[in-house]
Image (spheres, rainbow, N blue to C red):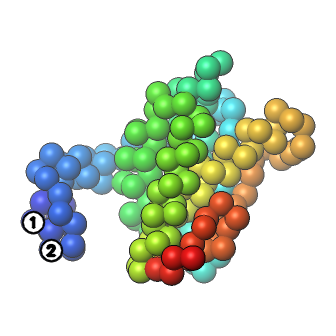
Amino acid sequence: MINKENLKEEGFDVSSNQASLIKEHYENPKNNKALEDYNARGVGRNPDNWGQVDMTINLDKNMIITDIGYEYKGCPTISFTASVFTEELKGVNFEEGLETTQKELANINAQENCDDCIKMILVAYIAAHQNYYEKISGTNEEDFTFRMVDNTMPYVTQECGIPQ
């Protein structure tokens, strides 16, 4: 069972409200779906275990994320982490979402114990962002853009635990 005490034992210092939010997303994940009508789609995959996150995003004319969905194969932490991540992105400008996602990916890569399950979610968003611009420029015939979790990706400036 997820509660504040269990999270604290795992090294997470969270408030009771944060623990409740985590529990809610764990027991009832949001946005775990593939959107049928979307503007952007990205797939993030971990080459070590073949886990993957497939993310679809719908944008309005002002580049605001109106809906977002994900499907995944891999560790169970993906479900509730992607649930929280996608809920936080609804109503956010697409470009601001990219900036936040890139910063979070860099933060995770700077930690000694990087969480590849969380990275797949972030990489899927970055791939969806790239897919959107490839589609509108006509440079990608595919319906999605694919990215692998890799500590040496061009948009990451450091490797896990080793600042450059």
The local secondary structure at tag 2 comes to helix
What percent of the width, then of the height, locates residue 106? 51, 63
Q: Residue at x 61, y 65 (%)?
A: 156
Q: Quickly name the residue at label 2.
A: 9
The local secondary structure at tag 1 comes to helix
Q: Nearer the viewer, residue 10 or 30?
A: 10
Position of residue 29 relative to residue 114, above or below, is above
Give the side of residue 15 with respect to residue 89, left or right. left
Asked whether residue 158 is in view, the answer is yes
Q: Residue at x 60, y 67 (%)?
A: 157
Q: Residue furthest top?
A: 61
Type of residue at label 1? Glu
Give the side of residue 99 with respect to residue 22, left or right. right
What percent of the width, then of the height, locates residue 13? 17, 63
Q: Quickly name the residue at label 1.
A: 5
Give the side of residue 162 with respect to residue 129, left or right. left
Q: Residue furthest front?
A: 164
**Residues under labels 1 and 2: Cα distance?**
6 Å
What percent of the width, then of the height, locates residue 100? 50, 47
Give the side of residue 5 with respect to residue 96, left or right. left
Position of residue 2 relative to residue 111, above or below, is above
What percent of the width, then of the height, locates residue 52? 59, 63
Q: Based on the displayed image, in which of its 4 quarters is residue 72 positioned? A: bottom right
Q: Residue at x 37, y 47 (%)?
A: 84
Q: Nearer the viewer, residue 27 or 120?
A: 120
Type of residue at label 2? Glu
Disc assigned to residue 35: none
How many numbered circles does the render carry?
A: 2
Asked whether residue 53 is in view, the answer is no
Q: Are marks 1 and 2 in contact (CB under 8 Å)?
A: yes
Q: Quadrant of the C terminus?
A: bottom right
